[in-house]
Image (cartoon, rainbow, N blue to C red):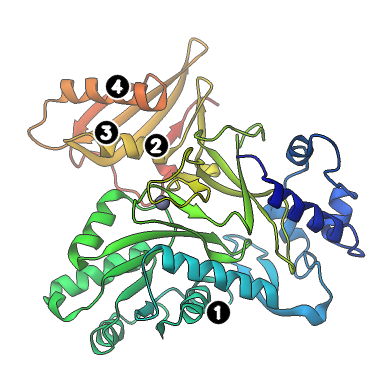
Amino acid sequence: MKLDATQLEMLRAQLERLSKVEGGFYKRKLKGARLGSCDPQGEFEALPFTTKSELRDVYPLGISAVPEREILRIHSSSGTTGTPIIIPYTKKDIDDWAVMFKRCYEMAGITSMDRIHVTPGYGLWTAGIGFQLGAELLGAMVIPMGPGNTEKQIKMMIDLESTVLCATSSFALLLAEEIERRGIRDRIRLKKGVIGSERWGEKTRRRISGQLGIELYDIYGLTEIYGPGIGIACRCDAGMHCFDDYIYMEIIDPKTGKNLPDGEWGELVITTLQKEGAPLIRYRTHDLTRIIPGVCECGCENTRIDTLIGRTDDMIKVKGVNIYPGQVEDVLRDIDGVSSEYRIQINRVSGKDEMTLVFETDPGFEQDAMEHTVRSMFKSRVGLTVIPSAVPLGVLPRSEKKTARVQDNRN
Ligand code: ZN
């Protein structure tokens, strides 16, 4: 997807503004880049990426591009290690975020007559308050629960007749199972769920929507770029529509940094077009997805990204092919008789990479046949020949961590 004329204009204005911020992060970094040549797309794609660690290096407020009097609020992304990232917001940033979030609700068919039960956390991170801002702009009734306290969640859900549940997939699943366990489904009025963009399997999705009897919509976002609400799935459930008037998205090969054509999987890179407090140019999200080519059946022409398949940190390269654990899970999930537990072993044999895929099979399935199916499905879907190895259900140790499923013995 190339920058369109409007995006290019916004981007040029933003670069112009950033070049004038005395002591500013981008004044130093971009040294007055303007996109003034006859190939602005090429010039843009040659600009350096912005990384998480750079944002950490300017902690706390070094990323700010406005005078302090214009900053209304900050949010923080909780780094897994060490220094967090602080993002300052101006009035416009907060308003724009609410506008995008309102559009998200509308895309999901949620209206001012809905009662929106918000369970993501409030505080330094962007989740709860983003869900609330958009809902208020929409004119819906917000029930600002925050996370935890299942007892109270369910009581409020029943008494206030919540119609929309906003949650992470794990919390939505927990609530769904508790409601099922208590046999109180008929007292719950939920119709829709807006679920945060962590990677979650089809099986979890089916359980949540089945147990609660609701439609689910994946929502995308990250604190560095406003927060959740910069994109959402539509009723066609064919990827997430993002808002091209606020952000520009690229997909790159995370190893080489080269731009990839639409349709190819890689790392999502986002540039903000209107942000004031902390504009970001070519920010590496580390989220793995692809831009879905073509126009969605729902008629919305906004750029779509696919469901996230993992993080770049999870990526492994075998025989020159980039592989993500999420892809492996997707292939295995689609084969009857294969459980979701697997191990990837990579070895170098006579100078060549070899990947063995160990997977569990359900009782009653012929292991030779399963191995054959896995080999051919993997070849056609991922483009790599693997050595399949079927084992009985329950043989592999259980692990919460994706990385623990990969054993790279090449070094
Ligand atoms: Zn659509």
Tell me which residue sits at (29%, 20%) in the image. 376
**Which comes before the other along the chain, label 4 or label 1?**
1
Label 4 Cα crowd, 10 Å radius (few <14 / some 14-19 / many 20+): some
Q: Residue at x 38, y 51 (%)?
A: 298
CB under 8 Å between discs 3 and 2:
no
The residue where tag 2 is placed is 327
Q: Depth check: 339 or 193 in front?
A: 193
Please tell me which of labels 3 and 2 falls first in the chain. Answer: 2
In front: mark 3 or mark 4? Answer: 4
For mark 2, give the secondary structure. helix
Q: Amino acid at mark 3?
A: Phe
Please tell me which residue is depicted at 39% across the width and 37% down the height of the picture: 327
Q: How many residues crowd around disc 3 within 10 Å: few (fewer than 14), some, or many (20 or more)? A: many
Question: Taking 10 as reference, is 84 left or right?
Answer: left
Q: Name the residue at the left extreme.
A: 364
Residue annotated with mark 1: 123
Tell me which amino acid carries mark 1. Gly
**Which disc, if any, is residue 375?**
4
Q: CA distance from mark 3 to mark 2?
A: 14 Å
Kindly state the secondary structure of the residue where label 4 is placed: helix
Question: Going from the N terminus, do you reach mark 3 or mark 1 first?
Answer: 1
Q: Secondary structure at mark 1?
A: loop
Indicate which disc residue 359 carries: 3
From the viewer's perspective, is residue 164 above or below residue 272? below
